[in-house]
Amino acid sequence: MSTAEHHVADHAHDDHDHGPAKGIMRWLTTTNHKDIGTMYLVFALIMFLTGGTMALVIRAELFQPGLQLVEPAFFNQMTTMHALIMVFGAVMPATVGLANWMIPMMVGAPDMALPRMNNWSFWILPVAFTLLLSTLLMPGGAPAAGWTMYPPLVQQTGDAFPFMVFSIHLMGASSIMGAINIIVTIMNMRAPGMTLLKMPLFVWTWLITAYLLIAVMPVLAGGVTMLLTDQYFGTTFFRADGGGDPVMFQHIFWFFGHPEVYIMILPAFGIISEIIPTFSRKPLFGYESMVYATASIAFLSFIVWAHHMFTVGMPLAGELFFMFSTMLIAVPTGVKVFNWISTMWRGAMTFETPMLFSIAFVILFTIGGFSGLMLAIAPADFQYHDSYFVVAHFHYVLVPGAVFAIMAGVYYWLPKWTGHMYSEKLGKLHFWISTISVNVLFFPQHFLGLAGMPRRIPDYNTQFADFNMISSIGAFVFGFSQLLFVYIIWRCVKGGEPATAEVWESPAGLEWTVPSPAPYHTFDVAPEVK
Amino acid sequence: MSMPDEAQRRRKARINAVKLALLALAFYAVFIVAQLYRGQ
């Protein structure tokens, strides 16, 4: 990493009176969007590997029926921590990192609108995750009631409980500040001529995502605060013995939780919408419909939350409302998928690593979307609920969905960040190993779920043995192949073939008008957008 | 972008940021108050 920064610093010295500070103080005190973007991305990568290790503990235990490696209580801690780390520590910070790096360059702004708050948003995160991870060392262990934290189970957590709540408060504060910064940067810092409907799709999807964050992170914070006061201050929000209602927590959690899944996937949609036109050598098909589809998905995400809790005993009208509103999401999502395909249609396509990941995204995310539609059917969901089918569904939308899009984005913009081309051969190798193994990992989980294997269990009936073994083999191949990703990035940072300003063949967007690596300060003079 | 222009944009951005923070706070308050009203 240090070499790339060295290059960036050199460039800054060439044409600017002040470059970054030296050593650790540069990173602690930086207000530069590129530095902060890099820190977010490195942090997300570390968390991805940490959460991934926990996933491998889970899959190692599930390799065979019976209890082999870990205590059931520790297994539950692993499922809970894996989810919290991947959602809040890996996927979200990775997309925020990409936003930090790319949004100012894409809209022609010199930096984020509120650079000091930007620094604060980032530095809260390592503190939050130190708090959360420290619970693994406590006598009672880490939180183990699932990332959904349902009461009354979560209230048996022990000493880790307040640590989990406070870490979520901190993550929420970080996300809200990040979101505010992104909105005001987009609304107030665009270059002259950059009207809203000329903005790149990645900027649009992040603008909408940021509004989702502002609306739902406080709700999560409110929900976990109520858990905290129920536990320590005698309130009975969710305690049936005091007139409260545990199901109400599920409503509050999923009012946050469903928009949260779009918070993770909308920026991914944005990345894919940048990459596919470049490697199809055609403008994005249906730009405006993409914007409206994104906005529709965001709106619908607020009125579908109870599809996560069809089995709690809702009135029939509730079941029907949430079933039909959920199915409606397929319409704007379908618009997007067809637009990506139409963009590729008759394009002069080439298949560099970012494009390969993008095509895999379109296909595999759509599989996750289809299983989502199956889950949306309320009567069918009574069978699928809390089974491995759900696990297969959301891992399809999150791993070959969100994570592949992030990887596609990293490969796409890495030459712009470092000034070097990554190894295309190794990138393709990483792609093929990942794509094959991710399907070996998650596809059999559909069958396990349909056959009745429940989620979040360390042991299972022997009838599930074969598919679990296949899934675990896929998991280990996928997990270890990500070390190749780390190696490719490290090698690209260290050196390699110099990248041109455009990097790819005539890509659209202001970020390709600045040199590679992007200078420490860009657009001190605003570009004119025609 | 000349400096006064950028400073003006940043000032506007700060005002908008405060508005958005209030919006976030409102979401927090609405859910807590609704719960208090309902349950306590």
Image (cartoon, rainbow, N blue to C red):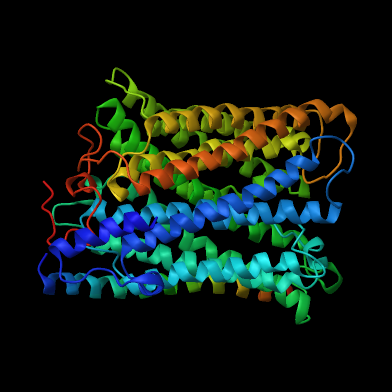
Q: Position of residue A302 (x, y in %)?
A: 53, 52
Which residue is depicted at the point 49% across and 33% down? A430
Residue closer to the observer: A216 or A55: A55
Horizontal side of residue A251 vs A30, given as left or right: right
| Residue A302 in view | no
Q: Is residue A5 above or below residue A335?
A: below
Which residue is depicted at the point 43% across and 47% down? A490
Q: Is residue A296 above or below residue A137?
A: above
Q: Position of residue A107 (x, y in %)?
A: 23, 54
| Residue A155 in view | yes
Horizontal side of residue A220 vs A420, given as left or right: right
Q: Position of residue A60 (x, y in %)?
A: 76, 41
Residue positioned most to the bottom: A233
Q: Point out the image quarter for the N terminus of chain A.
A: bottom left
Horizontal side of residue B12 vs A94, given as left or right: left
| Quadrant hosting residue B16 | bottom left
Q: Position of residue A170 (x, y in %)?
A: 55, 71
